[in-house]
Image (tube, helix red, strand yellow):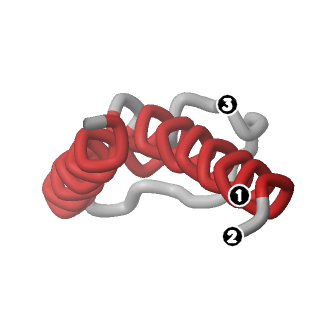
């Protein structure tokens, strides 16, 4: 690889890695409703709190996993 294409490739990987870390933090610490880092909108209404809390827990787990895999 040439020096320019190698630097461009590294830059793309760094930007994508930073984006993945941002999404992992946003979802891992915020759950289904996220932390609001992508704007605050009302896009759903909770009708069954038990199911919502279970799914929110799963989403937080996968967000944390996604963050930790990408960060480390």
Give how far across and how far down residue 1 sits, in percent: 69, 70
Instruction: Point out the frontmost of discs 3 and 1.
Output: 1
Residue in the foreground of this view, choosing between 32 and 52:
32
Dots 2 and 1: beta carbons under 8 Å? yes
Q: Residues within 10 Å of mark 1 (few under 14, many from 20)?
A: few
Q: Are marks 3 and 2 in contact (CB under 8 Å)?
A: no
Residue at image position (48%, 39%) is 21
Q: Find numbered disc 3 in the image and state the secondary structure of the residue it sits on.
A: loop
In the drawing, does residue 23 fall left or right of residue 36? left
Q: Position of residue 23 (x, y in %)?
A: 53, 45
Q: Position of residue 67 (x, y in %)?
A: 34, 42
Q: Is residue 37 left or right of residue 49?
A: right
Mark with earlier residue (3, 2): 2
Which of 57 and 19 lies nearest the eye of the viewer?
19
Quadrant in the rendering for residue 12: bottom right
> Residue 37: which numbered mark, if any?
3
Q: Quadrant of the C terminus?
A: top left
Q: Provide the residue designation for mark 2.
A: 1
């Amino acid at each position: 690889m040439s020096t320019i294409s190698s630097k461009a490739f590294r830059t793309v990987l760094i930007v994508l890695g930073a984006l993945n870390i941002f999404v992992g933090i946003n979802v891992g610490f915020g759950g289904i409703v996220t932390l609001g880092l992508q704007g605050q909108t009302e896009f759903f209404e909770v009708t069954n709190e038990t199911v919502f809390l279970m799914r929110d827990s799963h989403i937080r787990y996968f967000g944390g996993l996604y963050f930790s895999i990408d960060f480390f």
